[in-house]
Amino acid sequence: MTRSIPHPHASPSLGTQSRAARSRTTQSRAAQLGLVDVHVQRAGRSVLRGVDLTVNPGDRIAVVGANGRGKSTLLQVLAGDRVPDAGEVRRTGSLGVAAQEIDPATHRTVGELIDLELTAVRRALADLDAATAALAADRPGAADDYDDALARATRLDAWDADRRVDIALAALGAVTDRERALDTLSVGQRHRVRLAALLGAGHDFLLLDEPTNHLDAGGLEFLTDALRASPAGVVLVSHDRALLADVGRRFVDLDPSVDGRPRVYGGGYAGYRAGREAALQQWEDEHRRQREEHHRLQADLDAARCRLQAGWRPEKGTPRHQRATRAPGIVRAVQRRREALAAHALTAPPPPPRLHLPDLPGREDTLVRLDAVTVAARLASPVDLRIAGGSRLVVRGPNGAGKSTLLALLAGALDPTSGTRRMGADVRVGWLPQESGDARPGSAGERRWRALAGVLAAQAHVLVLDEPTNHLAAALVDDLTAGLRTTAAAVVVATHDRQLLRDLADWPVLDLG
């Protein structure tokens, strides 16, 4: 019996699905990843509560929430690296996991790290070779073994895996020398190598925790295209809202909810924004209604108590029999109102605070003016800039171009080496530097929130914000963006945040590149 051996399939790039990749999608439909009523506690605190999630090949799921809400923990549970305290985890199919940390001692070379992700590919090709030899020798059962091995190799598009990895290494700016020792690479380089291997391996599922860390603009574009085209089911945790918007189709929101359980929104990033706003508004309305009803019942009880007191101490001359007939009815009324108040539990907890910009003062004159300013070794080319009341400005440029230096000049935190800085009379500047210097306990997101709140509370005429979205959850950034667009104060923003740049695309731009 003669069987033809399939020829390796070639695909032009990771961003375009080949015939083999489409076949892989079809044959992966049995793969599934899921959580059923999963709970995780840490130090007595609930991190995940009642998580229900199903991931199929081809799904694009973004996990969002403030720092400490359990995003990385959710990925660890899905990957099998953490056992939940309660609930069920279902896994069928292969997983590729990009955690935030890589131990270079575990895999000594670039090639070994790649081989780890291509384990299933290597095994599939080896099994196909063995099955081919058995088929040629006409061994019993060889035909079935060959069909199984061919199906696995085809599903993984195994012949093209190393080429896919090489394409990804080049596109992500990663080291391509597979003999290179990992401990000679920077953290960013190690992450890029691992990400390239994951993208080329043909896994059924990709679990990615902050994959845009250490990527330049070209790498970000490549990763976005690769994830959108991949037949794998993708579960993505990222502070990069542009990546979430470009890739995510369903959003798992781990921020507080009225019942403490995560919310899942469809419709991409726009659907998540709209769904979250509607849910939060409903929560606020229900909490307000319950509190108003509670206050009404409390007022009724207080009024009944006052009537009871007056009933027991009527005006002089009131006959005793009238007191005797009135008092029991008043007592019963008090008891009914007490029972009604006790039965009225506040089931809706207080909703989380929104980020509302205070009413900042507006002015129509020139607030800050820079004339031919430079700062030695930090801002070489002279800059002329006038910030008028209510004006808007985005400052862009590569790292080292002087964006933070320029904002420090505007804030008066730095003196120019040459040129002049002038500020209007009684002008207040609210300056948010990249690093707040806040040493108090809390996550990076909490410290950033405190710093931002302090700047907004200062009633500034001009806000000077350096990377204001760093470490903030997507929902808070959306609130901040809306506030910046409507405030009466002047606003100057320097940012690399791609989604913020999209949201402020109609603002004037000063490019220091």
Image (cartoon, helix red, strand yellow):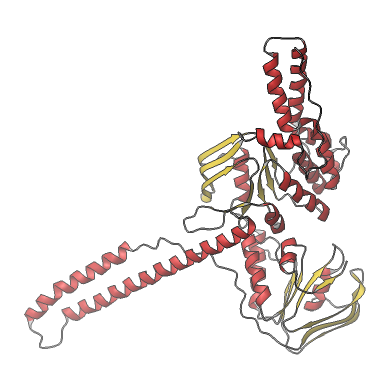
Q: Residue at x 26, y 69 (%)?
A: 337
Front residue of this view, candidates 59 and 67: 59
Q: Is residue 60 left or right of residue 312?
A: right
Say whether residue 354 is visible.
Answer: yes
Front residue of this view, candidates 497 and 506: 506
Say whether residue 440 is visible.
Answer: no
- Percent x, y for residue 258? 48, 59
Q: Is residue 334 left or right of residue 348?
A: left
Q: Is residue 447 left or right of residue 385?
A: left
Establish if 458 lies above or below 439: below
Establish if 368 lies above or below 274: below
Front residue of this view, candidates 420 and 140: 140
Q: Quadrant for the N terminus, please.
A: top right
- Percent x, y for residue 17? 75, 41
- Percent x, y for residue 196? 79, 42
Q: Quadrant of residue 145?
A: top right
Q: Quadrant of residue 299?
A: bottom left
